[in-house]
């Protein structure tokens, strides 16, 4: 039971990280109609920025805080230099060009930050554990990740639904010509949305960094997961991304935690461990295939698409 | 059939003749490396040609085509592991299994459109990738080394480099011929019609789903054959063969070479592998050049290499 609660918490945490990544992806797709494979690279660059800035400033908080505007800036540069001219192209061109960007970012990161990868040490304030209930301690840092993720999800909702900028974003999404004709600077709006997505991806990257390590290619596997999330949720729907991120996060952790034990009942432990590793990674894709077969436009299809 | 000596035909002839003569050079110069590189180019060209059938002619952006490379490779690897090395057994099984996998994936995926299709083919490829990771008895994540190459019972012998090379060459030419006939046929017209306007093809009375699915299965089977050759060439197969970036590489080859043109995939495979070889001898970080190059190709190189040749042809 205790193990179960712990795994659920882990699943929630992964779900929130996925949501931060998927939110930017689904916004960019919903509004600009752009498939951005390089979103995982922004996740990776966020983690690298945080690692370097933490080293320079000597403080994780400061490093993380400075990494976000850096990622925002990087996102804006990428949008203006490479992606802007892709909006009117078909999805295949977008996939290809952003695939090229992944190659570029991976090699650039290796060149600039080294092949070895970096670690971000946790500040002491976050190193401890919190006693959730008797016999179940849980790392403080993971709580912080959950809290920050939830706060971001809420403020994103507030931004999109309650503010003027959000209104413009929604207007641009549903009819870009009309919004443009009414005096909205669509180009600037797009750049802003892309930068916002980049910052969210970087936030996910830098929060994941102390738990894993910062290395080249860290963005690729989670990018595919984020794509699965937005496809399950319905492309363009932030609410769908939120629900799907939790589904995927929970399924992934619970599968990873319990499949080996279940399989050990039938085959020997070493084989079970290997099979379970493959099988639990597959679960998510099986879920996605099932969802698409039953509802070809995802769980929460965005209207008008 | 009279063939006009247009630039398109001329370049195709020169490239194919170059491939045909490469072993002669390799033997004379004693350069065995160029022969194994050439074999790899031919095999990847075959895989890219199979993708071109559905991507270029059929407009189905499959982002999981490398899965069949893995299926074909693993059939060879696993059968060799159990002592079955006869190509007459291995190859048909590999091709049939790839076709069956493609039938399953296609039947489910072709119900979706656009980005959803891209993503669901990717998802299925990821599943197969993780099946490879889960094959503990056959190396799991680390992959499986082939005990022996496929055996045709003497001739052609895959252990002999020039013979293996020519086998790949003949298979590629045969596949290209098959594609040419297929695309020109009624079947091919339906596929291409469904690409440009599926509802209209439906309205005329073609059950396009069946046609598209058939094309998808043919592409999977041919790519499975390429997987068989690739595993034999490397003496090794691993989940990395099926990684999603490999599927990306195949798309790159097709688009760079020229979508929906017969020779496009050959040019694409040749360019990508030659660039990889030359740039990586220049710098370890060759992808830092290749990545932006790709972006530029997408932005300015409409129609890829084959398109470039066709434009040159029109100007004359």
Image (cartoon, coloured by chain):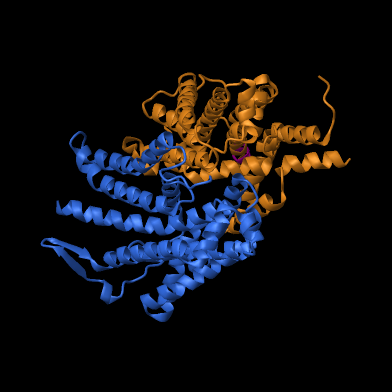
Chain colours: A blue, B orange
- Please check the rendered image and state whether residue B177 is part of the magenta-colored stretch, yes or no: no
**Which quadrant of the rendered structure holds the C terminus of chain B?**
top right
Looking at the rendering, the stretch of residues picked out in magenta corresponds to B34-39
Nearest the viewer among B178 and B160 is B178
Q: Quadrant of the N terminus of chain B?
A: top right
Compared across the picture, whether B68 is left or right of A267 comes to right
Residue A116: image quadrant is bottom left
Viewer-proximal residue among A291 and B248:
A291
Q: Position of residue B107 (x, y in %)?
A: 47, 28
- In front here: B263 or B199? B199
Residue B164 at least partly seen: yes
- A278 sits left or right of A75 in the view: left
Q: Which residue is farthest front?
A: A182
Is the stretch drawn in magenta largely helix, strand or loop? helix
Q: Residue at x 38, y 80 (%)?
A: A58
Q: Residue furthest bottom?
A: A57
Vertical position of residue B134 compared to residue A102: above or below:
above
Q: Is residue B36 magenta?
A: yes
**Horizontal and vertical percent for residue A296?**
46, 37
Query: Is B141 located above or below residue A197 in the figure?
Result: above
Q: Does residue A93 appear left or right of residue B6 in this picture?
A: left
Give residue A119's quadrant in the image: bottom left
B132 left or right of B173? Answer: left
Q: Is residue B281 visible?
A: no
Which of these two is toward me, B119 or B202?
B202
Residue pictured at 63% horizontal, 56% vertical: A178
Residue depicted at 57% across the width and 41% down the height: B250
The structure residue drawn at horizontal position 51% and vertical position 62%, both measured from the top left corner, is: A167
Expressed as whole percent of the image width and height from the top left, the position of residue A272 reads 25, 39
Residue B243: horizontal and vertical position, in percent? 47, 44
């Amino acid at each position: 039971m205790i193990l179960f609660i712990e795994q659920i918490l882990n699943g929630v945490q992964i779900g929130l990280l996925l949501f931060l990544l998927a939110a930017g992806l689904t916004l960019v797709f919903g509004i600009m109609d752009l498939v951005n494979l390089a979103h995982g690279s922004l996740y990776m660059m966020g983690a690298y920025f945080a690692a370097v800035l933490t080293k320079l400033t000597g403080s994780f908080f400061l490093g993380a805080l400075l990494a976000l505007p850096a990622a925002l800036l990087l996102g804006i540069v990428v949008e203006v230099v490479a992606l802007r001219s892709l909006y009117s192209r078909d999805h295949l061109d977008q996939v290809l060009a952003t695939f090229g960007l992944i190659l570029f970012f991976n090699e650039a990161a290796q060149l600039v930050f080294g092949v070895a990868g970096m670690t971000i040490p946790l500040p002491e304030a976050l190193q401890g554990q919190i006693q959730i209930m008797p016999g179940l301690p849980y790392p403080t840092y993971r709580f912080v990740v959950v809290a920050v993720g939830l706060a971001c999800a809420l403020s994103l909702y507030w931004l999109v639904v309650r503010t003027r900028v959000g209104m413009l974003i929604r207007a641009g999404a549903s009819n870009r010509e009309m919004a443009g004709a009414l005096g909205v600077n669509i180009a600037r709006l797009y750049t802003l949305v892309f930068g916002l997505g980049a910052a969210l991806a970087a936030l996910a990257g830098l929060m994941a960094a102390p738990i894993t390590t910062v290395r080249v290619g860290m963005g690729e596997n989670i990018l595919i997961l984020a794509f699965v999330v937005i496809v399950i949720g319905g492309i363009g729907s932030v609410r769908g991304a939120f629900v799907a991120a939790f589904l995927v996060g929970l399924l992934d952790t619970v599968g990873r935690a319990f499949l080996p034990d279940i399989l050990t009942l039938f085959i020997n432990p070493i084989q079970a461990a290997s099979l379970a590793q493959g099988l639990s990674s597959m679960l998510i894709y099986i879920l996605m295939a099932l969802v698409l077969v039953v509802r070809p436009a995802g769980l929460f299809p965005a209207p008008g698409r | 059939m009279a063939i006009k000596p247009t630039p398109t035909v001329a370049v195709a002839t020169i490239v194919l003749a170059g491939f045909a003569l490469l072993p002669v050079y390799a033997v004379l110069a004693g350069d065995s490396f160029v022969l194994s590189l050439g074999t790899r180019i031919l095999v990847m060209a075959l895989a890219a040609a199979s993708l071109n059938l559905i991507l270029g002619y059929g407009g189905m952006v499959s982002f999981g085509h490398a899965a069949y490379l893995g299926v074909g490779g693993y059939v060879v690897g696993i059968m060799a592991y159990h002592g079955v090395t006869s190509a007459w057994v291995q190859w048909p099984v590999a091709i049939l299994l790839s076709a069956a996998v493609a039938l399953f994936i296609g039947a489910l995926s072709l119900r979706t459109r656009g980005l959803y299709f891209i993503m669901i083919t990717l998802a299925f490829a990821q599943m197969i990738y993780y099946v490879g990771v889960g094959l503990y008895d056959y190396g799991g994540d680390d992959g499986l080394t082939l005990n022996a190459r496929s055996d045709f019972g003497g001739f052609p012998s895959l252990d002999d480099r020039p013979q293996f090379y020519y086998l790949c060459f003949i298979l590629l030419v045969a596949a290209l011929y098959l594609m040419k006939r297929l695309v020109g046929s009624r079947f091919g017209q339906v596929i291409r019609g469904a690409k440009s306007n599926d509802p209209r093809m439906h309205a005329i009375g073609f059950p396009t789903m069946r046609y598209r699915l058939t094309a998808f299965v043919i592409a999977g089977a041919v790519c499975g054959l390429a997987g068989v050759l690739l595993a034999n060439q490397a003496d090794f197969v691993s989940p990395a063969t099926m990684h999603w970036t490999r599927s990306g590489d195949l798309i790159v080859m097709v688009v760079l070479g020229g979508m929906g043109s017969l020779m496009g995939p050959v040019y694409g495979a040749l360019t990508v592998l030659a660039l990889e070889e030359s740039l990586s001898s220049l710098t370890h970080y060759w992808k830092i050049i290749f990545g932006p190059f790709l972006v530029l190709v997408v932005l300015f190189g409409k129609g890829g290499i084959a398109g470039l040749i066709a434009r040159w042809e029109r100007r004359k």
